[in-house]
């Protein structure tokens, strides 16, 4: 299991239709709420689906 925190930036293998492949993590749990860096679209997706599609992970801003 990959350690994912709120505020991290995930680069996924497939790009979003807007052209960006980077997503900011807004909420963690069994499902993750992600926000597209390119267009701001938000979605909830199962952690299992995301973990196998991560290309890279950047430490994002710390939210407290």
Image (tube, helix red, strand yellow):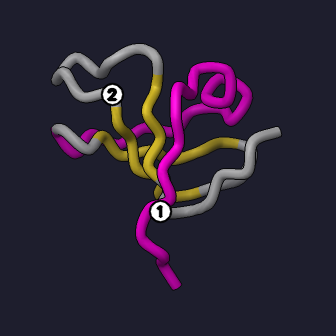
Q: To which quarter of the image does residue 14 belong?
A: top left
Comes first in the chain, label 1 or label 2 = 1
Q: Is residue 50 above or below residue 13?
A: below
Which portion, as a residue range, is magenta? 39-64
Q: Is residue 43 magenta?
A: yes
Q: How many labels sit on residues?
A: 2
| Residue 39 placement, left or right of 57 | left
Q: Kindly identify which residue carries mark 2.
A: 21
Residue to which mark 1 is pinned: 7
Residue 41 is drawn in which quadrant? top left
Mark 2: few, some, or many residues within 10 Å (few <14, many ≥20)?
some
Q: Position of residue 35 (x, y in %)?
A: 35, 46
Residue beneath the point at 48% across and 76% down: 62
Where residue 24 sits in the image (x, y, percent)?
40, 50
- Residue 34 magenta: no
Q: Position of residue 37 (x, y in %)?
A: 26, 44
Residue 41 shown left or right of residue 29 in the figure? left
Residue at far bottom of view: 64
Measure how far apart labels 1 and 2 are at the Cα level.
Answer: 16 Å
Residue at the image point whose x is 67% and y is 29% from the top: 51
Q: Hey, which residue is sitting farthest right in the picture?
A: 1
Please give the name of the residue rendered at 22% of the width and 17% of the height, measured from the top-left corner.
Answer: 17
Residue at image location 52% in from the left, 34% down from the top: 56
Query: Where residue 47 sits: x, y (%)?
Result: 69, 35
């Amino acid at each position: 299991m990959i350690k994912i925190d709120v505020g991290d930036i995930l680069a996924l293998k497939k790009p979003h239709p807007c052209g960006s492949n980077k997503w900011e993590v807004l909420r963690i749990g069994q499902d993750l709420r992600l926000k597209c860096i390119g267009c701001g679209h938000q979605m909830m997706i199962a952690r299992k689906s995301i973990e196998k599609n991560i290309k890279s992970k950047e430490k994002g801003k710390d939210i407290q």
